[in-house]
Amino acid sequence: MSVVAKKAKRLLRGVLLMSALTAAVAQAAPRDLIIDTDPGADDVVALLFALASPEELKVRAITTVAGNVRLDKTSRNARLAREWAGREDVPVYAGAPKPLLRTPIYAANIHGEEGLPGIPVHEPKKGLAQGNAVQYLIDTLSKAEPHSITIAMLGPQTNLALALIQAPEIVNGIKEVVVMGGAHFNGGNITPVAEFNLFADPQAAEVVLKSGVKLTYLPLDVTHKVLTSEARLKQIAALNNNAGKLVVDILNAYVKADMEHYGLPGGPVHDASVIAYLLKPELFSGRQVNMVVDSREGPTFGQTVADWYNTLEQPANVTWIDSGDAQGFFDLLSSRLARLK
Ligand code: RIB
Ligand code: CA
């Protein structure tokens, strides 16, 4: 073999080795994650999804907030999801019982009085962790390695906003915040223009936005494109495990309201899209935009305005996701639920 061929062979072997090492390192380092949530039907699906994915997501804690229902129920439901996932190693900290400024609103008409439609609930064996979620965020993020912890934000942003107001320096511990929330192209779900999580505490969302933390939003623009169908729910039911049955029963009850309201063939699983994005971002696409939140009283209260075409030429402050691979989402969700009991 010529000298050139031998050198080429050595170079190729080196490249292949490097790519294998890179893949191994990438695979080996699970993402440090805190899930802030107001369970909530789709929140519970998201929690099962995340807790079934320990190779990629090291869930340090679940922090709860009032939102879909009152704080005592969102906290109980987070503990239920943890129990169903067999992950009682993950602490649940209860946080803010109400928004920063506005009068509290809830969505029991959608999520049921217990915040979990379609299934019976019970008092989980394991209780809450000691201490408030806001203090937990401050203590954890202020001690964390620089930009090492991701926050999955599945409800109103009150806990993180309160932590940022008390200890602005915690932004240094945050890698990024991935938010289910907002709406631009196709209107809102709680008012003609506002999405529930933003409407429930727009001032909190403004505090987080102004902190300069790296932000990705998965708004209704994308979650209304990732819809259930009979086939997709059958795919989950076919897992023949408790987790699959819980998710099918929850979703069958949860999506009815959206299907009727929007005349859709299926319903969104909003919060679970955040977990799918963290696990497989290539399922989604969007662009860096300038986004503002309207917190003025009136018809646009809670509206998010995403400058998709950069009309105002303001600096981009969020990654705004507007599309996703729906079947890819359900395939990934099903494959992770299959791991649970
Ligand atoms: O608008 C959808 C969002 O509001 C989801 O997070 C759902 O759980 C509710 O909190
Ligand atoms: Ca939620």
Image (cartoon, helix red, strand yellow):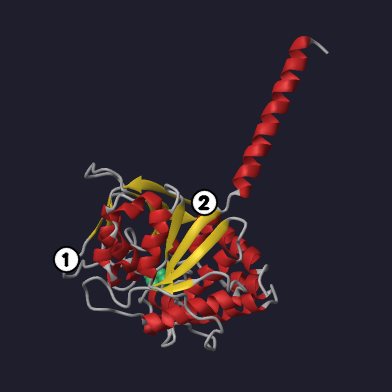
Q: Quadrant of the N terminus?
A: top right
Identity, as a three-letter code, of the amino acid under mark 1:
Arg
Q: Quadrant of ligand 1?
A: bottom left
Viewport quadrant of the C terminus: bottom right
Q: Residue at x 53, y 71 (%)?
A: 45
In the rendered image, residue 170, in percent from the top left (x then y), is placed at 35, 54
SS for callout 2: helix
Judging by the rendered image, the residue that carries numbered circle 2 is 281
Q: Is residue 150 left or right of residue 170?
A: right
Residue furthest top as drawn: 3
Mark 1 lies on a secondary structure that is: loop
Q: Is residue 64 above or below residue 288?
A: below
Q: In the picture, residue 183 is in which quadrant?
A: bottom left
Which of these two is toward me, 253 or 209?
209
* 117 up-or-down from 46: above or below: below
In the rendering, at what x and y percent does residue 146 appear? Answer: 42, 47
Work out whether 273 lies above or below 1. below
Q: Which mark is residue 296?
A: 1
Amino acid type, label 2: Pro
Residue shown at the point (45%, 49%) measured from the top left: 145
